[in-house]
Image: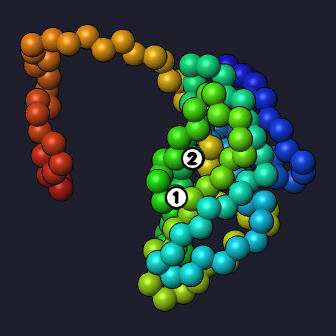
Amino acid sequence: MDLQLPLVTQDSFLMPSYAHESDAAMDLRSAESVTIDPLQRALVKCGISVAIPEGFAGLVVPRSGLAVKHGVTVLNGPGLIDSGYRGEVCVSLVNLDSSVPFRVERGDRIAQLLIVAAPKMTLRPVDDLGESDRGSGGFGSSGLK
């Protein structure tokens, strides 16, 4: 399926793109240079605005390489872009390294944009949710191995 995502940018260099044909999410690039000090955060502009179709949402998710190599991730990951939002896409990055600042240069790939189906749900109060194989097991209920 090939859906279109209307996008406005002043610079085609900042256009989100898929790194590989099979990738699920597009890389988002920084529209500015900024240094994020250790244990600090920054709202980084991406220089684009998108019109996500109704019934879909955009999830701004971390790039695994930034997290593993530098301790930099999306603070509210995943960030949510609703279909009605038309402002500039920005990424809230946090540097979790306790001693090394992280420098973002204009054009750096800083996060990924994943477009997902987001159907509207109607809530229906019930007295019982029924059984499932998991039941009410929550955090840690499946163990480590």
Q: Residue at x 74, y 64 (%)?
A: 108
- Residue situated in front as seen by the camera: 86 or 74: 86
Number of residues whose C-alpha sits closer than 10 Å to that of mark 2, classed few (under 14), some (14–19) or many (20 or more): many
- Residue situated in front as seen by the camera: 123 or 21: 123
Q: Position of residue 71 (x, y in %)?
A: 49, 73
Looking at the image, can residue 27 be seen?
no
Q: Quick check: 93 left or right of 33?
A: left
Q: Which residue is mark 2?
A: 60
Type of residue at label 1? Answer: Val
> Which mark, residue 114?
none
Q: Position of residue 4 (x, y in %)?
A: 75, 25
Q: Secondary structure at mark 1?
A: strand
Quadrant hosting residue 21? top right
Q: Classify 121 as above or below 22.
A: above
What distance separates the C-alpha of mark 1 from that of mark 2? Answer: 8 Å
Type of residue at label 2? Answer: Val
Mark nearer the N terminus (1 vs 2): 2
Q: How many marks?
A: 2
Q: Residue at x 90, y 51 (%)?
A: 11
Q: Position of residue 109 (x, y in %)?
A: 70, 60
Q: Classify 40 as above or below 8.
A: below
Q: Classify 79 as above or below 74.
A: above
Q: Are marks 1 and 2 in contact (CB under 8 Å)?
A: yes
Quick one: quadrant of the N terminus? top right
Number of residues whose C-alpha sits closer than 10 Å to that of mark 1, classed few (under 14), some (14–19) or many (20 or more): many
Q: Residue at x 61, y 55 (%)?
A: 91
Q: Position of residue 73 (x, y in %)?
A: 51, 63
Q: Which residue is mark 1?
A: 74
